[in-house]
Amino acid sequence: MSIKERLEIILEKIAKAADKAGRKPEEVKLLGASKTQPPEKIREAFAAGLSLFGENYVQEAKKKKEALTDLPLTWHLIGYLQRNKAKDALKIFDLIETVDREAIATELEKRAARLEKVVPVFIEVNVGGEETKAGVAPEELPALVECVLGLSHLRLEGLMTIPPYREDPEEVRPFFVRLRELKEDLERRFPEAKFRELSMGMSHDFHVAVEEGATIVRVGTALFGPRPKK
Ligand SMILES: *Cc1c(COP(=O)(O)O)cnc(C)c1O
């Protein structure tokens, strides 16, 4: 199947899930999770109508972006950000989805101030409490939000999560519900802030995420096919 055909199927599924939940399909953005995929695949996805992409590694993103400068693409960082990559990340990405600790927030603030730019960010939440996963623990989320809201070169726009993997997407639903509830709780606690975006849902469970309020779904294999080895 071509990327164009896969994209059509994904958009149909998004529309169906949105409809089921009484939402408008336009409320949901599709992000192509393009890690390990060559620039040609991104080009193909763009030709099919997609312009938002997410990369996990700063160096990999830098190379691909350089190969695609002729296209008007938007790039999100969706992988773990090391402190020593903060400066490069700010130069490459339009939005950073994975702010998950004060140390990285303050480092981004310092670097963004030097570059004289304001960077939109999401906070990544570890809704499953998995030790091996990045993301702030739900209990520590309000403190991190307060920290980020105090940083003038970061603009907090939403939350992101990578829930635990479950064979049955229905079993992932409670984790999506949890992220939405955390967002609603934050909106009550911090009325001055705007949490517009909920980035959740991947290839095998994005339809459930859309039903539970996702505004960005991050889809890799269902769009590009299997990932080539690096
Ligand atoms: C790889 C990746 C995805 C996409 O995963 P698929 O299962 O291939 O759709 C989404 N989000 C993040 C953070 C990823 O690393």
Image (spheres, rainbow, N blue to C red):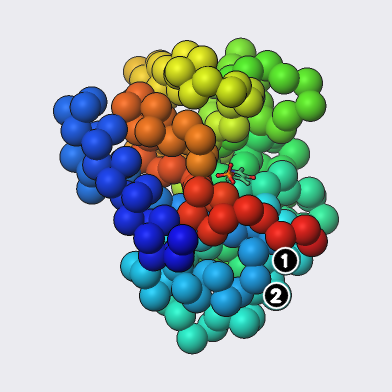
> Residue type at mark 2?
Lys
Q: Is residue 156 left or right of residue 67?
A: left
Q: Which residue does the image show at 21% across and 27% down from the upper left? A: 20
| Quarter of the image where the C terminus is located | bottom right
Looking at the rendered structure, the secondary structure element under dot 1 is helix
Quarter-of-image position of residue 22: top left
The x and y percentages for residue 147 are 59, 32
Q: Which residue does the image show at 28% across and 46% down from the upper left? A: 12
The x and y percentages for residue 6 are 41, 56
Q: Quadrant of ligand 1?
A: top right
The residue carrying mark 1 is: 60
> Residue type at mark 1?
Glu
Asked if residue 107 can be seen in this view, the reply is yes
Marks counted in the figure total: 2
Outermost residue, bottom direction?
A: 70
| Residues at marks 2 and 1, CA–CA distance in whole angstroms | 5 Å
Looking at the rendered structure, the secondary structure element under dot 2 is helix
Disc 2 vs disc 1: Cβ atoms closer than 8 Å?
Answer: yes
The residue carrying mark 2 is: 63
* Ligand 1 within 8 angstroms of badge 1 C-beta: no
Q: Is residue 184 left or right of residue 100?
A: left
Q: Nearer the viewer, residue 29 or 192?
A: 29
Outermost residue, right direction?
A: 84
